Image (cartoon, rainbow, N blue to C red):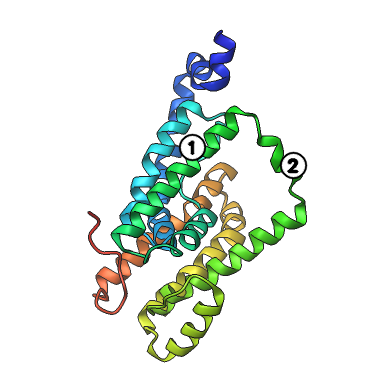
Amino acid sequence: MMTKLKRFIPAVDWLSRYDRSQFSNDLLASIIVTIMLIPQSLAYAMLAGLPPQMGLYASILPLVAYAVFGSSRTLAVGPVAVVSLMTATAVSQVATPGSPEYIAVAILLALLSGLFLIAMGLLRLGFLANLLSHPVISGFISASAILIAISQLKHILGLKVEGQVLSDIVPALLQGLGASSLPTLIIGALSIAFLFWVRSRLQALLLTLGMTPHWASMLVKAGPVAAVLVSIGAVAGLQLADEVRIVGAIP
């Protein structure tokens, strides 16, 4: 009986062996994940065509649920880009993005998806993923990355562009290039360049300066947080709120 309970609720197993040293590491990890999850969830909600605050709401319960039912000690769960993109593509077929109907349909879609996943888990249907070939998965991920990157150009350029498919997005972007916001473009481009530099060069630089690999890795992981904080400081300090589109008040 206890073996079956541990299989479905892994927390029953690891809580009995939990100690203070693990808590300190988990506390540090939770702070980093929380700081990262705030801007990430806001962005993914906008990618899904939902109000930014919906991303925050969708980020709380999954973390709590996975702490109890999850089987991996190192996995952080929450909104992801591909699911956000698929949500926007599906829901926009039946409702206008940003409308109350759109939000209601997105919530219903999330509920139905969760029920299907629970049913598939209980029926042990995970083996179906083995039937997907590597080229199919690689093609899907690559195409999703391209579509996500292009769909986010409107935010970097400070443009209002409608559409969820490339045939709608690309022409609208080309037509609106003349109305691009220079401050928005500069902040976006510098943030992207900084993130690429952090990912490729920062850790080697920190190790050269004598920092331990552990702390060098931690600072690299905090790179996106630094980009967000500096961007916020630049917009506030230079009083660019009227020229750079901001999220605004979160209900």
Q: Do the residues labelled 2 and 1 touch (CB within 8 Å)?
A: no
Query: Left or right: 217 with respect to 184?
Result: right
Residue 75 position in % (x across, y down): 54, 38
Quarter of the image with the C terminus in it: bottom left
| Label 2 sits on residue | 130
Amino acid type for the residue under numbered disc 1 = Leu
25 with respect to 3 (left or right): left
Report helix, strand or loop for mark 2: helix
| Residue under the image location 64 percent in, 65 percent down | 143
Q: Is residue 237 above or below residue 53?
A: below
Horizontal side of residue 16 vs 236, given as left or right: right
Residue closest to the eye, 144 or 249: 144
Q: Residue 206 carries which label?
A: none
**Residue 152, how many percent across, how many down?**
47, 70
Residue 122, picture quadrant:
top right
Disc count in the image? Answer: 2
Q: Where is residue 108 in the image (x, y as percent from the top left)?
A: 40, 47
Query: Is residue 25 among what the camera can see?
Result: no
| Residue underneath mark 1 | 115
Query: At numbered mark 1, what does the secondary structure look like: helix, strand or loop?
Result: helix
Which residue is found at the position 31% from the left and 75% from the top? Answer: 244
In the image, what residue occupies the spot 50% across and 69% down? 192
**Kind of residue at badge 2:** Asn
Q: Where is residue 45 in the image (x, y as percent from the top left)?
A: 40, 57
Nearer to us of marks 2 and 1 is 1
Say above or below: 179 vs 76: below
Residue extending farthest to the top is 1
Q: How far apart are marks 2 and 1 (CA)?
A: 22 Å
On the question of residue 106 being in view, the answer is yes
